[in-house]
Amino acid sequence: MSNSSAETTPIPQIDEPSFEATRATSKAKDDSESGIPVLKVVLFLAGTILLIVAAANLTNLSGWSDRWGAIPVFLVFFLVMSIAGRWFWTGADAIVSAIVGNKR
């Protein structure tokens, strides 16, 4: 086998921006966006309302279990509470971060 120039030529490195440069750029973008994102406020409100509605309907769970069965009622109630909790905490984190500020 002979060594051709194609086999021994090194592949040129692509200059990628450094981590610090990327971090500085993203920090500048974050600083330019002030306030709380509207979607997160909407998620906070929707999560809060869903949690209140779920808590208000706790007394109806036994009736729903008799009508549709305990397992489907439990699974749907758990799903609704999980989604509502996730939306609530997503919005709450955004609101607290906007008020207190990120400490990164």
Image (tube, grey):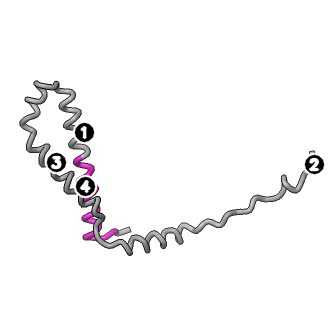
**Residue 65, located in which quarter of the rendered image?**
top left
Most distant residue in the left direction: 59
The reply to whether the C-beta atoms of the residues labelled 4 and 1 are less than 8 Å apart is: no
Specify whether residue 92 is in view.
Answer: no
User: Looking at the image, is mark 4 or mark 3 earlier in the sequence?
Assistant: 4
Q: Alpha carbon of mark 2 to alpha carbon of mark 3: how far?
A: 73 Å
Task: Compare marks 2 and 3 and give the one earlier in the sequence.
Answer: 2
Per the image, label 2 sits on a secondary structure element best described as loop
Q: Are discs 4 and 2 less than 8 Å apart at CB?
A: no
Kindly identify which residue carries mark 4: 43
**Which residue carries the number 2 mark?**
2
Give the residue type that dot 1 points to: Leu
The kind of residue tagged 2 is Ser
CA gap, disc 4 and disc 3: 12 Å
Other-residue count near label 3 (Cα within 10 Å), few / some / many at <14 / 14–19 / ≥20: many
Residue 58, position as x, y percentages in the image: 10, 39
Label located before the other in sequence (2 or 1): 2
The residue singled out by tag 3 in the image is: 51
Secondary-structure class at tag 3: helix
Q: Is residue 60 above or below residue 99?
A: above
Q: Which mark is residue 79?
A: 1
Amino acid type at mark 4:
Leu
The answer to which of marks 4 and 2 sits earlier in the sequence is: 2
Mark with earlier residue (1, 3): 3
Q: What are the residue bounds of the magenta stretch?
A: 84-102
Q: Tell us which disc is closer to us: 4 or 3.
A: 4
